[in-house]
Amino acid sequence: MPATSPPATTASGRTVRHGAVLAVTCLALATVVAAMASLNVALPDLARETRATQTQLSWIIDAYSLVFASLLLPAGAIGDRFGRRRSLLAGLAVFGAGSLLAMLTTSPEALIALRALLGVGAALVMPATLATITTTFPRAERARAVSVWAAVAGASAVVGLLTSGLVLEIGSWRMVFLLNVVLALAALALTLVFVPESAEPGAASGDAVGAVLAVAGLGVLVYSVIEAPVRGWGSPLTLGGLLAGMLVLVGFARWELTRRQPMLDPRLFTNRRFAAGSLSIALQFFAFFGFIFVIMQYLQLVRRDSALAAAVGVLPMAAAMVPASRLSPRLTARLGVRRPWVAGLFVVAAGMAVLSQLDDSTPYGLLAGGLILLGTGMGLAMTPATTEITDALPAGLQNVGSAMNDLSRELGGALGIAVLGSILSAAYRSHLHLVGVPAPAVEAARSSLAAATAIGGPVAEHARTAFAAGLHEALLGASGVAALAAVAVAVLLRPSGTGQERAGGAAEDTEHAEPELTVITGGATR
């Protein structure tokens, strides 16, 4: 944890302990980020008990990410206007209550609905954590505090996997939701004690139309992607849904351009630093969360590891990610923001390419090597991307800025789970050829690998081979996405002909940042 300044005092006379604020906000952050990945460890157990199909498993994971991403912008605006501490408390309460209800359900449909409710709570929590840090810490300490936040955001997914693996050794998938309840209660209590209130009463009021358009567009888009392996990528429903989702999102952008105080002004993306950070975060986590969804099923159902062994097996990724994220600010200070950032994205692409070679006989050394590359690349690229997004905005828009950072992360994750899960599911079905097997068994095996392994015998062996083929195609796609992100960031942050690159971004961006932001915020004085 970075060294912090002596305790400060708020306008109300309350003492602010920066170290405690950072610790508590990171606990709240870890609680909601871990929930994106922690249930992945329990998917085989959950599929066996609830008889969920592969498509339903995708929805159980992605309902959380989709609602989380869709509501981040309006939730960020709510935190700006009514207080980030209040947003934290409300979000943690909803998250904990939803997790408690999820422990009591028995059907995939109910789980999907409750995971969506958890996403509502998470959307209130996540932007408030980063905005609290950026508005509480002095500017001189902010980059290092953000590096801790970024490390927690990245590593929490893996820590969530490990913790879930541990609790699954003594109980069922319901224990994962019990863990959510405990963490939410602890974060809520500590927030009441240590976190100061911060708000911008003059911030933009609610934008109900924009929120509905954003949720509808993203919902239709992700629904179409997840259902594509069942309906067919070329079916009218799939193509129509993809087109409809994109049209609604275009309508959202046009609507926001007409607002004096938009929830998200599309003109923000004319700032190259902001655009590079948002795109990088989205594509990094597209690859990362899609990978987590695929790899935990591979480890347990193809390699036949226990839940705990599978979670421990991915620890090299976290072990590489945390020190790399702490090293990233130093490399940025020495080399400029562009080089370590782009290098990190290319390392992510290399890691995914290595991991795409996994099959049922792959030695662990190859798996660990790919995980180390993936973790190192994520750590190097996350901190500069996050810092560029928040530094591009004035203090009055920090919660919306951090909501945009989180939106990029969660939207990228939701689309990654949907797209890579769909590639995996489609390839699994196309490579699964069962001859001389009763039709009911064939249908069950095609529904999910968990169902095929329950049948056992040659059906299970054929299914494992088919799943490995699907994993290969999905992770090669993830590698391509990470390489695309590296090229895009390199182009967006290319040095100008009149200035040299600085540590925090391109020199020309600094020169013109404030005039751009004056336009972006609708002429509001900041």
Image (cartoon, rainbow, N blue to C red):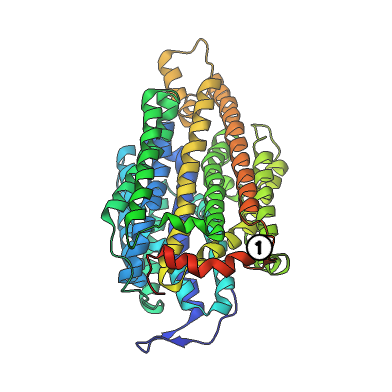
Q: Residues within 10 Å of mark 1 (few under 14, many from 20)?
A: many
Going 64% across and 42% down the picture, which residue do you hit?
352
Which quarter of the image is occupied by the N terminus?
A: bottom right
Q: From the viewer's side, name the closer residue of 142 and 461.
A: 142
Location of mark 1 (residue): 337
Which quarter of the image is occupied by the C terminus?
A: bottom left
Image-quadrant location for residue 199: bottom left
Is 451 situated above or below 215?
above
Residue 323 horizontal/vertical position (percent): 66, 63
Is 305 situated above or below 139?
above
Image-quadrant location for residue 298: top right
**Residue type at mark 1?**
Val
Q: Residue furthest front?
A: 498
Q: From the viewer's side, name the closer residue of 292 and 197.
A: 197
Q: Residue furthest bottom?
A: 13
Residue 107 appearing in the image = no
Going 41% across and 51% down the picture, which residue do you hit?
69
Residue 275 horizontal/vertical position (percent): 53, 55
